[in-house]
Image (cartoon, helix red, strand yellow):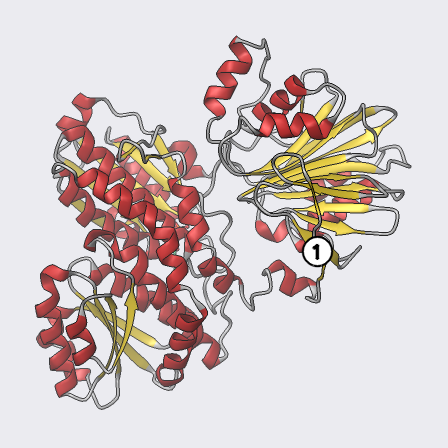
Amino acid sequence: MCGIVGYTGTREARDILIDGLKKLEYRGYDSAGVALQQDGELVITKAAGSVADLEKKLVNNSKNINMGIGHTRWATHGRPSDQNAPPHSSASGEISIVHNGIIENHRFLRKWLTEEAGYTFRSETDTEVLVHLIEEHYTGDLLDAVLEAISGVEGSYALVAASSREPGRLVCARQDSPLIVGFGEGENFIASDIPALLAHTRKTCILEDGEFASLTAESVEIYDAEGRLLEKETFEVTWDIEAAEKNGYKHFMLKEIMEQPVAIRETMRQRIDAAKGKVDPTELDFSSEELARLEKIYIVACGTAYHAGLIGKVVVEQLAGIPVEVDVASEFRYRNPMLGENQLAIVISQSGETADTLAALRLARSKGVKVLAITNVVGSTVSREADQVLFTWAGPEIAVASTKAYLTQLIVLYLVALYLGEGRGTLEPGQSAELVEGLLALPEQLKAILSEENTAKLCAYCDHLSGWGSAFFIGRNLDYPVAMEGALKLKEISYIHAEACAAGELKHGPLALIEEGLPVIALVTQEAVLDKTLSNIQEINARGGAVFAITQEGFDDVGRQASSVFTIPPVNDILAPVLSVVPTQLIAYYAALARGSSVDKPRNLAKSVTVE
Ligand code: F6R
């Protein structure tokens, strides 16, 4: 989730780029840089850290520079460092680029560029692959070179390139990563997000996937992938800067909920071989002996990440046949866990900085247990100290309540479970292909869940819910951790007290609290325990509780028992948690909205808990 800004015109490019990059700071980043066209050269300045650090480095820069490109980096390939910071230049220094996204075939391209074309790489980034590839195809026209280079690239990109041989020209390309052209008078802009443009222009045009643009101070030309000139409509942005940062959404949390189809698709990208019907997380490196010897896995995390771990336990036990214990990190570190040989610890942390999770990681490693980290932040302490890392490519999560990071953690856990099952030979014939197909279908299914009709339905339900001071979430099997996550989210942002209860436990105590109208959200997506959960719903009905059921299409009996029903698309039961949690996120959001609480920054909570 990096930020891109490009400018060509007559004003001071440095000031426009710095100002634009600052407007993108809310997205999170670890380094920044600019390439400015100066005396026939592209001069690059980079800084690890903030845009302000970059600005300081540019103070003595000469004036009257009217073209440049800038970037704030959220590390993906390669840790945050000066070397890996953007922009990247070609071997001759004549071409510089900034790039957002992930080049899937970067290993292949890097090998080809090194071995066949004689390039030397200076960074670990996939972006550097692109700039060499553009130079390789450059014969005097930057657009032609970019078109040619991109035709050999697989993956996602928002790319802006400049060549010192074509002063005043920027060439851009987009696939699965946003780029917006801003039109000025005698100047033009390009940016990955609208806030970077608003100080200068409101006249914009969004590039679509597969489109290219060539910008000079006087002209904007947009092309399709075959290089044919397109007629594109412009649109006037009417949002203020705050709304623009949230992409028009009222809160970051809602924006992040809506980003989930893309986030999980990015997390699966490059890690699934659809043709073979197998997962292929190339970052994982366990020998087959190591996998065969595994006797136990500990999953350790806090809060929402712990709930992901609870799902991971069921999935790993089912698919890989390894017993899994899941611990809250603050408990794990003080309970003298029986760490020993033939074990693996998996720590899950969005931020990668949570103190208790880090302590658990260190404890496991001190006892000789290998640690696999699942985290969203490249360069985080957890990612640096773990033996192996799988990143969740959710992009920066700004709302305190975790949503898209959680969903991507689930996806990574499915990938790990399938990888372990494959390596240990515990999967049933056809099971891998069936689950891979199911995983790949999830982004579209999520989009359907997030439709306007569905959100309106959940919003209407929250009119009832928000009047109550207390609510229950129930579920069995994989539905139970989803109920826990739903309850946590509701209490966290709406301040309604919410309790998750394994549905079978109701009559061992909690049933005493059920009264006329009390909201009970029932997760009912697991066929194996369907009848059991239906009986629990009846127990609640008999005491006047109002059950809102979240179920799968085809589970028709649920509709007959519950007061209201929300249906997710039909899905393999094991994958259902990825879909069923989303309505609970929206319920928490709309309940918080109805109660007027501070959605993105709930009271007493912080995004990253770096103290015990
Ligand atoms: C709840 C939430 C928290 C975090 C927890 C762990 O919405 O976000 O419960 O999940 O504080 O944080 P990370 O994942 O950064 O270790």
- Residue at figure coordinates x 78%, y 36% from the top left: 68
**In this rendering, would 14 be left or right of 491?**
right
Q: Position of residue 570 (x, y in %)?
A: 25, 59
**In this rendering, would 460 be left or right of 472?**
right
- Asked whether the viewer can see residue 350, the reply is no
Q: Position of residue 9 (x, y in %)?
A: 86, 42
Q: Quadrant of residue 490?
A: bottom left
Q: Position of residue 473 (x, y in %)?
A: 25, 71
- Asked whether the viewer can see residue 319, the reply is yes
**In this rendering, would 176 be left or right of 263?**
right
Question: Is the residue marked by circle 1 packed among few (<14), some (14-19), or many (20+) residues within 10 Å?
Answer: few
- Residue at figure coordinates x 37%, y 64% from the top left: 449
> Is residue 366 depicted above or below 485 in this figure?
above
| Residue on which disc 1 sits | 233
> Residue 117 or 50: which is nearer the viewer?
117
> Residue 452 or 591: which is nearer the viewer?
452
Q: Position of residue 292 (x, y in %)?
A: 14, 27
Kind of residue sitting beneath label 1: Glu
How many numbered marks are there? 1
- Residue at figure coordinates x 40%, y 81% from the top left: 460
Q: Quadrant of residue 10?
A: top right
> Residue 85 or 134: which is nearer the viewer?
134
